[in-house]
Image (cartoon, helix red, strand yellow):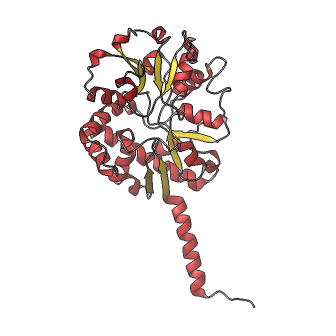
Amino acid sequence: MKTIMSYASLVAGLMGTTAMADAHANDVTLQLQWVTQSQFAGYYAALDQGFYEAEGLNVTILPGGPDIAPPQVLAGGGADVMLNWMPSALAARERGLPVVNIAQPFVSSGLMLTCWKDTGIESVEDFRGRTIGVWFFGNEYPFLSWMSQVGIPTDGSADGVTVLRQGFNVDPLLNREADCISTMTYNEYGQVLDAGVSPDDLVTFKYEDQGVATLEDGMWVLEDNLDDPVFVDKMTRFVRASMQGWKWAEENVEAAAEIIVEYDETGAQSLAAQTRMMAEITKLTQGSNGALDIAAYQRTVDTLLAGGSDPVISAVPEGAYTTIITDAALN
């Protein structure tokens, strides 16, 4: 029996298809690399201040956490765009996940090692025989590459370092389980000070100062999606609004911190801590318009390749970034 679709049903079907198309064109899900904090203030500011709305976008921001791997979320279709450190993203790309950098709001690195001064550590060579806390889940790559470049084994030998798989806290340093730990200038270093430790009791080694800094907190999408003009247009508007958010956050440090506290559903973030973090974050995003600095990209690749017998990546990446989004967003 042949069924004849009514006019009303046809219209309803067309409206449903149009609604789905509109959602495809305007809905964006962003996966953060970590929990809601000032590290991501530009995106929350763009959401709160209506910059995304002005671009016709409906943006959902997904906080990260210790059990969330942004590349896996992106690969599984749980997000349109993720934030990720470049070493982690390039390693994932080499393993077969075709991620592409579309924008780079962070122009310098906040990563460093923080050590007890009373251990006698004064230089990188003094790391030998020490225990050093290192974050994993993709965050270990800059450290391993650095040690490989300076010829310090990470096998726990007397001439090398013992790598302690550090949780995302500063406990190993405070408890004297490690001589040094991984910290960010804008986060964990402040946590050490909050625990009552004086800066005079510490010595720090910034990756930037050591010449081994790699790019952090870039925006990454799946390569195949860039073949879709609708997706490219959506990402262009997203990047443009996000960078508006970053500029606003840089110029309104306290207000940006207040937004973070408001959007943090866990209630774990204090305004004082987020204001301090935001002040440090501005040092890493200052001067960025979102466009990837190709020279900084190349330095990152060279650092990751310079890993001796066990480099982070084994070949120069091809197609790992595109400028089509920022070229359009900035014009």
Of all residues, the one furthest to the right in this rendering is 1
Would you say 125 lies left or right of 314 here? left
Of all residues, the one furthest to the bottom in this rendering is 1
Q: Tell me, yes or no, if residue 313 can be seen here.
A: yes
Give the quadrant of residue 258. Answer: top left
Would you say 235 lies left or right of 189 here? right
- The one nearer the camera, 209 or 274, is 274
- The one nearer the camera, 99 or 52, is 99
Residue shown at 60% from the left, 41% from the top: 99
Give the quadrant of residue 279. Answer: top left
**Where's residue 240, x and y in %?**
44, 46
237, above or below 162, in the image = below
Would you say 110 lies left or right of 141 here? left
- The one nearer the camera, 100 or 169, is 169
Residue shown at 55% from the left, 60% from the top: 24
Q: Tell me, yes or no, if residue 111 can be seen here.
A: no
289, above or below 150, in the image = below
Q: Count the marks: how many?
A: 0
Residue shown at 37% from the left, 31% from the top: 286
**Where's residue 116, x and y in %?**
36, 16
Location of the N terminus (image quadrant): bottom right
199, above or below 77, in the image = above
**Where's residue 115, x and y in %?**
38, 18
**Where's residue 326, x and y in %?**
50, 41
Residue shown at 39% from the left, 42% from the top: 40
